[in-house]
Image: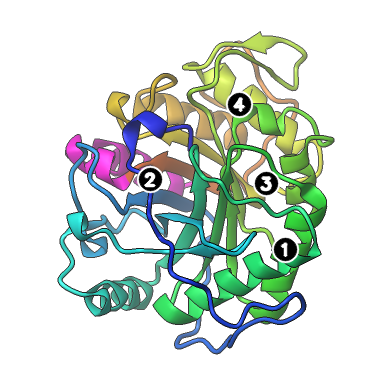
Amino acid sequence: MARAQFRNKLLGTAAVAALTSGGLISTGTAHAAAAVPAHAVTGYWQNFDNGATVQKLADVPDDYDIIAVAFADAAGTPGAVDFTLDPAVGYGSEQQFKDDIKAKQAAGKSVIISVGGQNGTVSVSDDVSANAFAASITGLMDEYGFDGVDIDLENGLDATYMTKALKTIHDKKSDVVMTMAPQTIDMQSPSAEYFKTALGIKDFLTVVNMQYYNSGSMNGCDGKVHAQGSVDFLTALACIQLENGLAPSQVGIGVPASPSGAGSGYVEPGVVNAALDCLTKGTGCGSFTPSKTYPGLRGAMTWSTNWDAASGNAWSKAVGPKVHGLP
C-alpha cells in the first residue's frame, strides 16, 4: 500500500533455505484452505506498531474473510522474501502466532502473507529470481500455514517473471489464495504491467483489491477524469478492470479504514456501500452509472484492521454486512 509514513519497514533477513534456480522447497500443507466466500472482505493486519491499535490476529473481527499479514520483505537472495514477527505486536512466541492463524482458518477465514508495501524492494525480473520468489512464498506457507500470497509491490513489477513466479506457486499449491493490491495508476490499462500480471493468472487469481487512495484523479471507463473520494471514483475505475478481462469475482474496492490510514482518499463507509450497490445492482450511483451490473463483484478491502480497530471497527461493522449481503 502507499503507506511509507504509516509503517515501519520489516527487517526479515533470515536466509531462505533450499533455493535453487529450478527447484522449490517442501510444499506440504497442514490444513485444507477454506474456500473464499463469493463476496469477501479483505483486511491488512499490521505486523508493526505505527500508532494504530496493536492487534493479534485473534482480535481481527469476523467480518474479515481474508486477512493479509503485512508484510514479507526482501531477503538476501534476489527475488526471495522472508517474514519476521515483530515483538511490538505482543506475541510471546511464533507458535502463538501460528496457532492464531489456525484458529482463523478453523473459523473459515483465509490468512495470507502480503509482499511489499510502498517501501518493499522485492524484484522478480528473471528466471532465477522468479524461482526464488516462488520458493520463498511456498516456504512461508509451509512454515506458518498461510493460505496464500498478496502482491503489493509499488516500485515496479515485471509481468513476465511475476506471472511465472505466481504460476509456479499455484502449481505447487493448487488451493492458493492469491490477491493483488495495485495502485490506481497500475490498473488504468490492460497494457500496464500489474494489469498484465492479473490477466496472466486469471485462471486462479482470487481478487484484485486496487488501492483507491493516495492516488489523485484518474481516468474512468467513461473517458472522464474522476477525483478520489467520490462514488464515481470507485465505480468508474472498477469498470476499467471489469470491462478489460477480469471477472467480477476478481474485483474488489480497496479503501482506508479511517482518515489516519492513508494520506488521502478516505471515504465514509457509506460511500463504499453506495459504490458496491452501484456496481452490483445499478443503484446508489453518482454521475456515472455502468452500462450493466456486476452482481458477482468480490467485495472490498481496507488498510488496515488496526486502523479499523482504532475507530471502533466502524468500517468493518458497516462494510462487512453490506459485502456479505450482496446478491
Tell me which corner region of the image, top left, top right, bottom left or bottom right, holds residue 238. Answer: top right
Provide the secondary structure element on which disc 4 rests.
helix
> Is 325 contained in the magenta span?
yes
Q: CA distance from mark 2 to mark 3?
A: 33 Å
Of labels 4 and 2, the one closer to you: 2
Which circle's residue, 4 or 1, is located before the other in the chain? 1
Which circle's residue, 4 or 2, is located before the other in the chain? 2
Of labels 4 and 1, the one closer to you: 1
Residue 201 visible within the image? no
- Closer to us: 25 or 211: 25
Give the residue at mark 3. Answer: 248
Which circle's residue, 1 or 3, is located before the other in the chain? 1
Q: Is residue 289 above or below residue 201?
A: above
Question: What type is the residue that disc 2 sits on?
Answer: Lys
| Crowding near the residue tagged with mark 2, few <14, some 14–19, many ≥20 C-alpha atoms within 10 Å | some
Q: Which residues are magenta?
A: 305-326
Give the residue at mark 2. Answer: 9
Disc sitting over residue 130 in the figure: 1
- Residue 315: x and y in percent read 30, 37
Give the residue at mark 4. Answer: 235
Q: Are marks 1 and 3 in contact (CB under 8 Å)?
A: no
Q: CA distance from mark 1 to mark 2?
A: 23 Å
Tell me which corner region of the image, top left, top right, bottom left or bottom right, holds residue 6. Answer: top left
Question: What type is the residue that disc 1 sits on?
Answer: Ala
**In terms of secondary structure, what is the magenta stretch mainly?**
helix
Q: Is residue 301 above or below residue 192?
A: below
Residue depicted at x 32% and y 70%:
104
- Residue 180: x and y in percent read 59, 49
Which circle's residue, 3 or 4, is located before the other in the chain? 4
